[in-house]
Amino acid sequence: MMRSKSLIVVLAAGLVLSACSGKSSTSTTSTDQNASGTDGPHKPGGTVTIANTTGQTWPCQFNPFNPAQNQQVLGLLYEPLVHVSVVGNSKETPMLATGYKWSDDLKSIVFTIRDGVKWSDGQAFSADDVAYTFNLMKAHPALDLFALWSGAGLTGVTASGNQVTMTFDKPAKPYFYNVADQVGIVPKHIFSAGEAAAHPDTWTNPKPIGTGPYLLSTCGPNNIEYTANPTFWQAGKPWIQKIEYPAYLDNAPANNDLASGKAQWGGQFIPNIKAFYLAKSPDNHTWSPPLLNVGLFPNLDPSHAATSKLAVRQAIAAALDRNQIAQIGEGGQQPAANQTGVVTPTFQKYFDQAALTASGYEKPDPAKATSLLASAGYSPANPLKLTVITITGYTDWDASLAVVKQQLQPIGIDLTVDDLAQQTFLNKLYTGDFDLAYYSEQNSGPSPYYELRQVMYSKNSAPIGKNASSNFERYNSPEADKLLDEYATADDAGQVSIVKQLSALMLKDIPMIPTTGSVDWFQYNTADILGWPTPDNPYAEPSPYKVPDNEQVMLHLYSKAAQK
């Protein structure tokens, strides 16, 4: 099923030092090659059909700054400056920027912008569009999904000729991934006029204009169709000429279409995947590398009297049998998580086993949980009634929450599961209209810092009723903010230490309660379509919902039939 941009995968042990250490200037060393790698060229042709559950029909809104909508346009239509492959040892692929150079103090970076690119309406793309995109995020903070202006210390973005200079008030190398990979560049001539200029955060953008390899052809409640952009700047690309993206309200029909080969690209949980999917055809394959954390986001705002109580959150964390949730809810396809928030074995060197053991959250402890809940005034005789919101159609999440409900009932928590359409769920999540939410943060990166910054950084959040870009639980800790800010100037050992200190706050304050590790759900069919990412060639995160990696996948794919 669709997972909102949630992403991480198996990484090399030394990745973070190369991505985030900063004592000298750095520039790109990769050659300016396109995203097709060494495979090709191929003849154009073929259609890829995507099957992953959205839990709702398509609203046909395509605002690249709206997290509820941008998965349908980032990558395919709106491109980043540089693609950074989290699964591929941080390999960088120049996209709208051909290169970059950091200053010696790592407080500024200059991107060289690609010449000869056109927007899909025929107008020329330029460095001015890049500067406009980032300055638009400053003028409208709701668009700044990564708190680049408010938290990362971005102080200015200017264009001169074919170069864009970004300045920061502190060393900013950890934010390269967010700046270069996670922001889709938008056309100034479109976003500076009319409704787009007046309300860029709520504008529906029904006819998106981008630089990417695909155009929005048609959209209806039941299907989005994309067609190849004939003026795409990578000559001869994309090879696949059409993408069909049906809306699935439930896993079952999507899984049936994947198993039969009707759909070629899947991104969701398939129960009993060996018998139901893999055994159906030798052309059916799967590779779902480990990701972030899935878990309970308790509302910490004082207006939510129960979940804002530390003892209540501690009781929930102590009661959960995460291994049971992983085995029953996820069919063993996702590993059990832990309360430190560090995904293992992906980021093993950041994991503090001793701290987890000392915390008492390593294994379920119903007696401790009952005592903690009693200290907050609740018991099996006087149960605490809570509602957890989730997304309808996510059958594995429903199964996991059924286990959570069962585990919390004996300690005195009566949990109601509220399945909501995805758009309704996200509106409630972003505005803080929930007791508990079952979810995963949105973006990955080359160390646990990137997820923990989303969970714990106060500047990513917002008052109740306002849209938070992350930190949906409204956690506010000056200590956490200070540690997250210090990460940029720390060496490798210092970064490991900072992550462990953030883990200690996860154990102490329980701002979020992980249940299972998330994975990048991915199923693919090779009857006609080849070029998929694999463990041996992990050029991009493989899920269809992972943006902007979806562009990299589509630029590698080709049809066998079209080559005849």
Image: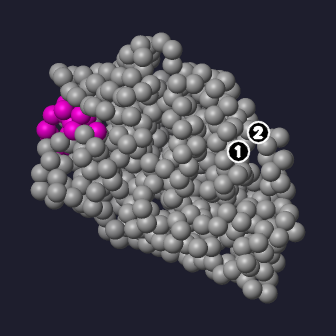
What residue would you read off at disc 2? 352
Q: Measured from the top left, where is residue 157 in percent x and y?
A: 26, 31
Q: Nearer the viewer, residue 326 or 20?
A: 20
Q: Measured from the top left, where is residue 32 in percent x and y?
A: 37, 19
Mark 2 residue crowding within 10 angstroms, few (<14) / some (14–19) / many (20+): some
Residue plotted at (67% across, 24% down): 493
Q: Along the horizontal axis of the image, is 134 left or right of 488?
A: left
* Magenta highlight range: 119-134
Q: Is residue 444 magenta?
A: no
Label of residue 504 in the image? 1
Quadrant of the image containing the C terminus: top left
Q: Along the horizontal axis of the image, is 519 left or right of 3?
A: right
Q: Along the horizontal axis of the image, is 235 left or right of 119?
A: right
Earlier along the polypeptide chain: callout 2 or callout 1? 2
Q: Residue furthest bottom?
A: 381
For the residue marked with disc 1, what is the amino acid?
A: Ala
SS state under label 2: loop
Q: Nearer the viewer, residue 224 or 526?
A: 224
Up-down: is 34 above or below 284? above
Q: Is residue 100 shown to the viewer in this render? A: yes
Residue plotted at (62% across, 69% down): 307
Label of residue 270 in the image? none
Mark 1 residue crowding within 10 angstroms, few (<14) / some (14–19) / many (20+): some
Q: Nearer the viewer, residue 301 or 363?
A: 301
Q: Is residue 122 magenta?
A: yes
